[in-house]
Image (spheres, rainbow, N blue to C red):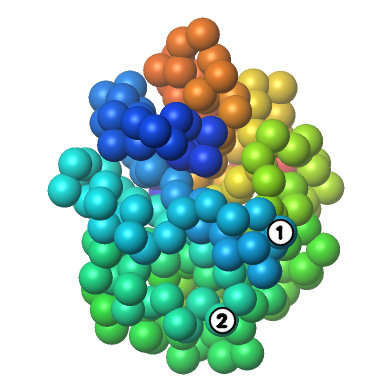
């Protein structure tokens, strides 16, 4: 059985106090720290890169789940490995040779993840899933925080979970109390949430709510 993992997205945190935000999330029960890396090319926004990961690494023991929304992700594997990233997640749409990239990520001591956009069919992940540590199903168009959850993407999660019962399946985009049960019952076990955690009156309670939903869903078949 896969384990529930809650990953606050630091894109919604206070960038002036990023190390403190990381430690605050970990103290509140987060499992991962989701780092949104955008290059202004693959997606229109521009956020953080390997130098910031390197600066954060000495200040947190948290698992740095780095989601690279970048063109030519191969270019950045070495930099992120040296910076201390724990997981390097690239977009299927951004590379011509996913398997070689997966092997390179593993050779650098990181876990490998693959993300797909909402309009990308889930079957593109099937041949690579046995070698991946995680597959990320985007539930919004990548590039900006605060978007609305796309429930139609849950069909991808269901199909992936049926084929790969032990795979970590991450969902990212618009996750909130009103839709977490849908994601959890579809089979997602790694939950990325930014606005709904950082904007909550009690971020710790929100993390607990997400975890409870995932754990509860695992007690019944996916629907």
In the picture, residue 66 is in which quadrant? bottom left
Q: Is residue 197 above or below residue 131?
A: above
Q: Residues within 10 Å of mark 1 (few under 14, many from 20)?
A: few
Q: Which residue is mark 2?
A: 72
Q: Is residue 25 above or below residue 97?
A: above
Left or right: where 31 falls relative to 167: left
Q: Residue furthest top?
A: 201
Q: Residue furthest left?
A: 58
Mark number, residue 53: none
The spot of residue 218 in percent (x, y) is 52, 38
At horizontal 64% and vertical 21% (from top left) the residue drawn is: 177
Q: Is residue 70 above or below residue 182?
A: below
Separation (CA) of disc 2 from disc 1: 15 Å
Q: Is residue 124 above or below residue 24?
A: below
Q: Residues within 10 Å of mark 2 (few under 14, many from 20)?
A: some
Circle nearer the N terminus (2, 1):
1
134 or 1, which lies in front? 134
At horizontal 26% and vertical 24% (from top left) the residue drawn is: 27
The spot of residue 83 in percent (x, y) is 26, 64
The spot of residue 211 in percent (x, y) is 46, 29
What is the count of numbered marks?
A: 2
Q: Which residue is mark 1?
A: 44
At horizontal 78% and vertical 69% (from top left) the residue drawn is: 121
184 or 46, which lies in front? 46
Q: Could you tell me if residue 178 is visible in this image? A: yes
In the picture, residue 104 is in which quadrant? bottom left
Left or right: where 80 falls relative to 222: left
Quadrant location of the C terminus?
A: top right
The spot of residue 48 in percent (x, y) is 46, 54
Q: Mark 2 against mark 1, which lies toward the viewer?
A: 1
């Amino acid at each position: 059985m896969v384990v529930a993992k809650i990953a606050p997205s630091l894109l919604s945190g206070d960038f002036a106090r990023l190390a403190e935000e990381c430690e605050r999330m970990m103290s509140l029960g987060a499992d991962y720290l989701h780092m949104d890396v955008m290059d202004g090319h693959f997606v229109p926004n521009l956020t953080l890169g390997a130098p910031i990961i390197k600066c954060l690494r000495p200040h947190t023991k948290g698992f740095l789940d780095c989601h690279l929304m970048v063109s030519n992700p191969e270019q950045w594997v070495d930099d992120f490995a040296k910076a201390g990233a724990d997981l390097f997640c690239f977009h299927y749409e951004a590379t011509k040779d996913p398997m070689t990239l997966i092997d390179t990520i593993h050779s650098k001591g990181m876990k490998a993840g693959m993300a797909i956009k909402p309009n990308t069919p889930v079957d593109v992940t099937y041949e690579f899933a046995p070698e991946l540590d995680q597959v990320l199903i985007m539930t919004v168009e990548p590039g900006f925080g605060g978007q609305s959850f796309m429930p139609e993407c849950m069909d991808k999660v269901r199909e992936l979970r049926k084929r790969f019962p032990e795979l970590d399946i991450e969902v990212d985009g618009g996750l909130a109390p009103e839709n977490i049960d849908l994601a959890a019952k579809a089979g997602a076990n790694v939950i990325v949430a930014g606005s709904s955690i950082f904007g909550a009156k009690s971020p710790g309670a929100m993390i607990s709510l997400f975890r409870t939903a995932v754990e509860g869903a695992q007690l019944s078949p996916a629907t």
